[in-house]
Image (spheres, grey):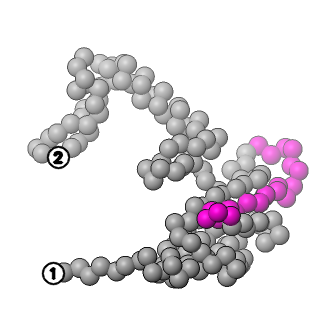
Amino acid sequence: MTIRDLIPWGRNNGHWTPTAFNENREPLLSLHREVNRLFDDVFRGFGVGLPSLNGGVSFGNVWPSVEISDQDNEIKVTAEVPGLDEKDIEVLLNDGVLTLRGEKRSETEDKERQLSERYYGRFERRIPLAYEVEEDKVDAQFKNGLLTVVLPKTEKAQSRVKRIAIRH
């Protein structure tokens, strides 16, 4: 077996395409893929952090899910937290990191439950901010299971943004 046989992609007419895979002919490659799949399932199921492309830590099932928009004068973070009230969530800002934490409790103590795909328990999301913000003007609102935090940028942070014209 050559090293090229271990690569699941090959060039075909100048394009990268999956190569033909025969499990009967390459049992070690099949075992390797199956072990990788098992590890992926374990890490995804337990939420174990794995390195991500942006240098941070990525999780299989990160909760709550967030949207972050970076505008000229503010950063806006929206988190989906269905089934929670504002009293169940804590929003903190410390040293350029926005922290969202809280706990979602089960509504029932159903011991006969066979399957639950709902998330219960404590959560904490830390979101590093790339800009200085005016901490005394940060605003957080909660409505219909959505937490929205607006973080106004300082004048210094706003002046660092420079628009560059694109020429034809």
The quarter of the picture where residue 159 lies is bottom left
Q: Locate residue 52, reporting x and y percent.
A: 48, 48
**Considering only vertical position in the picture, is 130 above or below 36?**
below
Specify whether residue 51 is painted magenta: no
Spatial CA distance of label 2 from label 1 is 31 Å
Residue 100, located in which quarter of the rendered image?
Answer: bottom right
Q: Is residue 44 left or right of residue 106?
A: left
> SS of the residue at dot 2?
strand
Q: Is residue 45 left or right of residue 123?
A: left
Q: Residue at x 41, y 77 (%)?
A: 161
User: In which quadrant will I find the C terminus?
Assistant: bottom left
Residue 100: say if magenta.
Answer: yes
Q: Amino acid at mark 1?
A: His
Q: Residues within 10 Å of mark 2 (few under 14, many from 20)?
A: few
Q: Is residue 110 left or right of residue 124?
A: right
Q: How many marks?
A: 2
Three-letter code for the amino acid on which mark 2 is drawn: His
- The residue labelled by disc 1 is 168
Disc with the residue nearer the chain's start (2 vs 1):
2
Where does the magenta region start and end?
A: 94-114
- Label 1 near label 2: C-beta < 8 Å? no
Residue at the spot 61% in from the left edge and 71% down from the top edge: 78
Q: Secondary structure at mark 1?
A: loop
Q: Nearer the viewer, mark 2 or mark 1?
A: 1
- Can the viewer see residue 82? no
Looking at this view, name the residue that lies furthest to the left.
13
Q: Nearer the viewer, residue 108 or 94?
A: 94
* Residue at the image point whose x is 25% and y is 17% from the top: 1
**Residue linked to disc 2:** 15
